Structure formats: C-alpha cells, structure tokens
Amino acid sequence: MKFLVLWGFREIRVGIPEVAKMISGLQDYAKKLQEQKKLERYYHVVGRHGGAWIFDVESNEELEILLARMPVYNFAVYEIYPLTEMISR
C-alpha cells in the first residue's frame, strides 16, 4: 500500500538543541526506511518547514508505527493520503 504523507511542524523551535537534533536525525531515518524498501522517496516542500514522503508499506498499522518512530513525531502534524495507480482504458 502506498501513502503520500505531507508533514510539517506545529511550531518551529529549531533553536532548541533537542529539536535541532531531532531534525538532523530525519535524513538518517529516511535512508534507513529506503534501505528497508518502506520509503520510496522523500522531498522537502519549498516554502514549508516539513516534507512529502511516499511510503510503500504492508498496512495502515505499519505506516502508523513508522510515523510514530520519526524523530520529529511529537512536533509535527501529518496529512496522509492513500495512493493508487491510475489505470487508463
């Protein structure tokens, strides 16, 4: 199952050392998920503090677990959209 996850920060607190550390851990987390074939692509959305990630997971539950493990989970808000192939006839 593929999902588009748009996420962004509720409040930007980059000056707080623990938040800056969490943000810096995002790229490592994304690479780990790509190696596991759970994350197809991840993008920065220009003009926004957050990103757009395309997940390929087995279930809604697996997606929820992966999101909960994101380093910024407690500081972010998420929009989640299931994706499907467009079939032409």
Image (cartoon, helix red, strand yellow):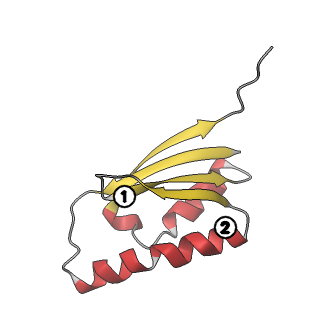
Q: Which residue is drawn at 70% across and 54% down?
A: 57
Q: Badge 2 local density, few (<14 within 10 Å), some, or many (20+)?
A: some
Residue 38 place in picture, x, y as percent: 68, 61
Is residue 89 in view?
yes
The residue sitting at 39% across, 52% down in the picture is: 45
Callout 2: SS: helix
The residue shown at (50%, 49%) is: 5
Residue 71 position within the rendered picture, expressed as x and y whole percent measured from the top left: 44, 73
The span from disc 2 to disc 1 (Cα, nearest Å) is: 18 Å
Q: What residue type is labelled 1?
A: Gly
Q: Residue 34 carries which label?
A: 2
Horizontal side, residue 13 vs residue 88: left or right: left
Residue 58's place in the image compared with 20, above or below, is above
- State the residue position of label 1: 50
Q: Is residue 14 left or right of residue 66?
A: left
Looking at numbered disc 2 in the image, what kind of residue is underneath it? Gln
Query: Where does the C terminus fall, quadrant-wise?
Result: top right
Depicted 87 relative to depicted 64: above or below: above
Q: Does residue 77 appear in this view?
A: no
Above/below status of 80 relative to 44: above
Q: Position of residue 72 (x, y in %)?
A: 39, 69
Direction right: furthest residue: 89
Label 1 sits on a secondary structure element that is: strand
Q: Which of marks 2 and 1 is nearer the N terminus?
A: 2
